Image (cartoon, rainbow, N blue to C red):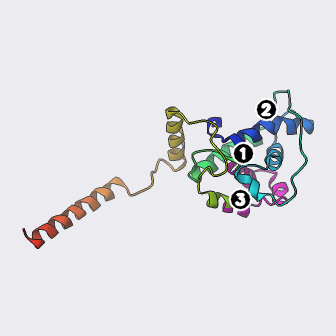
């Protein structure tokens, strides 16, 4: 999953231990993710914020800080949001959407302009594109297959378009029409 994070999303993730440590916690919470996104002020989610830029310049944490279960759930939800929106990456907008939709930090985020409606509008405007954010690395063939499989798994294995039987029926009817037109128009 982390191979699909944009450089901005990775920068946010890298700052998470600093926020947890500053609050005296030994695990990373969804609130840490919300504060790190708010402090980042770059990338696709930057346009959401309605309050002044915070002065949260925390020193890097030197301790290994694990994610708590709620934060793991938010990160998994960010993958689903990215897949549902047709994106080929996980950006700050997907992290923010997952937080707004599933975490206890949603009220704190809403006070700063990140309402569900504003985030849904942002996702619609971006339409799955990278826009301000850049992929951190070029996905490997294996990673592209896994992403495609994850998207298929999310949609129940259904690919967009008509079922094969309909496609064949339409092709047969089209061929019959073309043949009838050729016979009707003469040599």
The mark that comes first in sequence, 3 or 1, is 1
Query: What is the span of residues highlighted in magenta in the rendered image?
Result: 93-121
Q: What residue would you read off at disc 1?
A: 74
Q: Is residue 100 magenta?
A: yes
**Between tags 3 and 1, which lies in front?**
3
Cα–Cα gap, marks 3 and 1: 15 Å
The mark that comes first in sequence, 2 or 1, is 2
Tell me, yes or no, whether the two marked residues, 2 and 1, touch with CB atoms within 8 Å: no
Tell me, yes or no, whether the two marked residues, 3 and 2, touch with CB atoms within 8 Å: no
Cα–Cα gap, marks 3 and 2: 27 Å
| Furthest-bottom residue in this view | 184
The chief SS type of the magenta part is: helix
Number of numbered discs present? 3
Q: Residues within 10 Å of mark 3 (few under 14, many from 20)?
A: many
| Furthest-left residue in this view | 187
Q: Secondary structure at mark 2?
A: loop
Q: Nearer the viewer, residue 74 or 57?
A: 57
Q: Quadrant of the N terminus?
A: top right
Q: Secondary structure at mark 1?
A: helix
Q: Quadrant of the C terminus?
A: bottom left
Q: Nearer the viewer, residue 137 or 25?
A: 137
Mark number for residue 66? Answer: 2
Q: What residue would you read off at disc 3?
A: 119
Q: Residues within 10 Å of mark 2 (few under 14, many from 20)?
A: some
**Between tags 3 and 2, which lies in front?**
3
Q: Nearer the viewer, residue 139 or 175?
A: 139
Q: Secondary structure at mark 3?
A: helix
């Amino acid at each position: 999953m982390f191979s699909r994070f944009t450089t901005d999303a990775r920068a946010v993730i890298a700052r998470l231990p600093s926020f947890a440590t500053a609050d005296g916690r030994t695990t990373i919470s969804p609130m840490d993710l919300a504060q790190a996104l708010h402090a980042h002020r770059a990338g696709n989610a930057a346009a959401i914020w309605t309050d002044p830029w915070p002065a949260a310049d925390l020193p890097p944490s030197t301790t290994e800080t694990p994610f708590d279960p709620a934060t793991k759930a938010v990160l998994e939800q960010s993958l689903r949001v990215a897949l549902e929106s047709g994106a080929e990456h996980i950006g700050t907008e997907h992290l923010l959407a997952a937080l707004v939709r599933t975490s206890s930090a949603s009220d704190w985020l809403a006070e700063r302009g990140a309402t569900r409606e504003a985030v849904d509008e942002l996702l619609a405007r971006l339409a799955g594109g990278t826009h301000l954010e850049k992929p951190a690395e070029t996905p490997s063939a294996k990673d592209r297959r896994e992403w495609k499989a994850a998207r298929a798994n999310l949609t129940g294995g259904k690919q967009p378009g008509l079922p094969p039987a309909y496609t064949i029926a339409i092709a047969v009817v089209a061929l019959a029409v073309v043949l009838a037109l050729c016979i009707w128009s003469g040599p």
